[in-house]
């Protein structure tokens, strides 16, 4: 989360907020793409392209990224 006490004054603070918001949006988009890849190559596939351990680890990582 953004801590206003550590922001710079004026335009620099707004620039930082804009960069943080942009980064958060990019992380959300990346998580959506990775979940779609898991869906196509693991959950909806008749063949095992990705091991269950890797899928579980990726799901845990993606879940932790969305919780922050």
Image: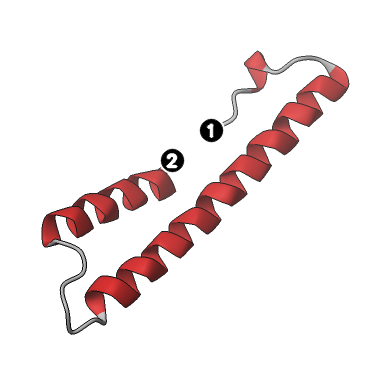
Left-right relation of 23 to 49: right
Left-right relation of 31 to 13: left
Q: Is residue 46 above or below residue 59?
A: below
Residue 23's x, y, as percent?
A: 61, 41
What residue appears at the point 66 percent right and 42 percent down from the top-left corner?
21
Q: How many numbered circles does the render carry?
A: 2
Q: Secondary structure at mark 2?
A: loop
Q: Secondary structure at mark 1?
A: loop
Query: How far, Cα to Cα, is label 2 from label 1?
Result: 7 Å
Residue 55's x, y, as percent?
A: 21, 59
What residue appears at the point 70 percent right and 35 percent down from the top-left corner?
19
Residue 54 quadrant: bottom left
Which residue, given by chain and number where applicable, does mark 1 sit on?
1
Residue 43 quadrant: bottom left
Quadrant including the C terminus = top left
Left-right relation of 27 to 52: right
Q: Is residue 39 above or below residue 53?
A: below
Which residue, given by chain and number where applicable, does mark 2 sit on?
68
Of mark 2 and mark 1, the one earlier in the sequence is: 1
What residue appears at the point 26 percent right and 82 percent down from the top-left corner?
44
> Which numbered disc covers residue 26?
none
Residue 48's x, y, as percent?
A: 15, 73
Left-right relation of 24 to 47: right
Dots 2, 1 in contact, CB < 8 A: yes
What residue appears at the point 59 percent right and 23 percent down from the top-left corner?
3
Task: Check disc 2: other Cα within 10 Å, few if <14, some if 14-19, many if 20+.
Answer: few
Q: Is residue 62 above or below residue 45?
A: above
């Amino acid at each position: 989360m953004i801590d206003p006490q550590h922001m710079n004054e004026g335009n620099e603070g707004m620039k930082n907020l804009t960069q943080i918001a942009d980064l958060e949006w990019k992380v959300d988009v990346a998580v959506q793409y990775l979940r779609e890849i898991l869906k196509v190559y693991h959950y909806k596939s008749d063949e095992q392209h990705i091991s269950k351990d890797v899928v579980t680890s990726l799901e845990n990582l993606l879940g932790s990224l969305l919780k922050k």
